[in-house]
Amino acid sequence: MKIYILTIFTFFWLSSSAQFWNTTPALSTAGGSYLVAAHHVKSSIYVVDNNQIFAYSKDKGVTWTRPSTTASSNAYVSLMGVGDRLYAVKKLNTYDFTLEYTTDDGATWITDTVGLPLNNTKTGKRSLNIRDMGNDYILAFDANTAVYKKIGDASWSNTIIDPIVNVDVINHKGTWLATGAQGLKTSANNGSTWVTLNTTGLPANFLGYKLASNKRNKLYITSGPQSGGQIIYISQDEGKTWNATNSAGLYTHFGANLGAIHAVDDYVIAAISPAIGDIKTPPPFIASTASTPDFEVGDSSGLIRGSTNTMLPFFFNVDNRLFTMFWHLYSSEPGFEGKETTSIIKINAQIAKAYPNPIADMLQIEISQPNNWKIINNIGAELLSGNALGNFELSLSSLKPGVYYLHINGQTQKLIKL
C-alpha cells in the first residue's frame, strides 16, 4: 500500500510541474514577429500582429485561422469584445483614430464614430478605451471624455463621470462604476447620471487606478501610483465598504506598481510593473485563489524572457481558460470554472432562460410571452412575485444566500443565491 501511494504522488507531482503559461499558435498563424492586440467575443478569440494581420480561434486558443482578407489600411491599436461585436480602435495618422466593429470575424468592418468627440488638434476622432457595460451597452472613454450607447443606437451620447480625469470604468452586476480624480462614482441608469459613492475602508483622498468585478459578489479596486500603487482593496457590498488585501510588498523592486487586474469566481490576478531596465525575467504578477484573497507571487513560467520590460497589458478569460498577451498570446488554466450557467425552463412550446445561476443579485429572465412568476424558498413560502412581458431583470438583493426556486407558469427552476 505504501508503494502504491508513493507512485500516485510521484505521478501527480510530475504532471503538475508543467509551466503555468503556454504559448498559443496565434502569432505563428498571423505570421508576424509580435502581437499588438487581442481580445474575445464570447468564446471566439481574436488577435492582430505587428504586420496588421488578423487571426481568430473558435476553440479557446487551441487552433487558429487566418482569414483570406487583406491587411487593414488603418493600424489596429486595440481590440475589445462587446456583445456579439468585436470593436477595434484604429489609427488613421499621427493624430486621428477611428472606431470600427465587425460581426463576421473581421471580413468587414463598420465605422461607429457618430457622436464621438473630435480631437482638438485635428478633425479626426480620439483614441478611446472601450468597455462592455452589459445589457448591450458600450462605453468609450479617455482621460477627460466619456460617451456611451446601446448596440443599435445611431450615435454616441455624452456622460459626465469626472470633470478632471477618468481612469477606469467597469460594469458590476448592472451597476456602472468609475474611478478617477473625484474618487469612486456609480451609475444605476446605464450612464445617464453618476453619483459619488460614499465608501468606508478606502483612505482619505484615495486615487483608484484599476477596477475589476467577478460578476458575482466581489469588487476590486487598486491604488494608483500616487497612493502607493500596490494595494488591492475588496468590497462585497457593492462598493460601500472596502478592506485592504495582502497584495502590497510581494515585490520590493522600485516602481513595483499594480497594473491590469482581472477577477473570475474566487480567482483574481494583477500585473506588476517590472524592475526598470530588467529584460532578463518575464513580467511579474500576483494572484489569489482563496475566497478571502491571499495573494502570492505569480508563476511566470512559460512567458517569454529578455524581450521587453513592460508589464502584462491585460487579462481575459474564456470559460476556464485565462489569457494574457506579451509578445505572444498565452493561455493558462488556473482552476476556476469561469462559467455563468444559464438555467433553461420549458414552458409549453416556449423556452424561458434565467441566468446567471448561481446569482449574486440581478437575475436575467428571457421569455417571449407574458407570464406570472414567483420566487419561493425551500419550504414553499412565496417571497417575490409578479407578471412580466418579454425579457426583464429581477433583483434578488433582498434575499439571503441560499437555495430558492423560480416558478414561471407552473414550471420550476432551482436557483442558488450567493
Image: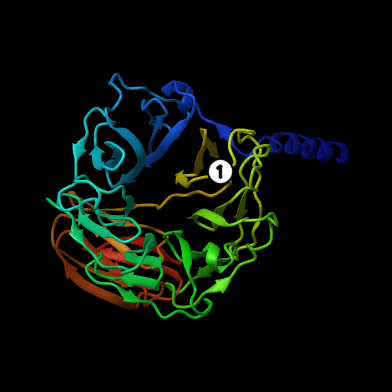
State the residue in front, 408 or 97: 97
The residue that disc 1 covers is 310
Q: Which three-letter amino acid code belongs to the residue tagged 1? A: Thr
**SS under mark 1:** loop
- Residue 233 position, x and y percent, is 54, 68
Q: Residue at x 28, y 71 (%)?
A: 188
- Residue 268 position, x and y percent, is 54, 56
Q: Does the image show residue 42? A: no
Left or right of 89 on screen, residue 276: right
- Residue 354 position, x and y percent, is 30, 57
Left or right of 234 on screen, residue 114: left
Name the outermost residue toward the right: 2
Alpha-carbon neighbours of circle 1 within 10 Å: few (<14), some, or many (≥20)?
Answer: some
- Residue 257 position, x and y percent, is 58, 57
Left or right of 289 on screen, residue 65: left
Q: Residue at x 79, y 36 (%)?
A: 10
| Relative vertical location of residue 205 with respect to residue 393 in this rendering, above or below | below
State the residue in front, 14 or 195: 195
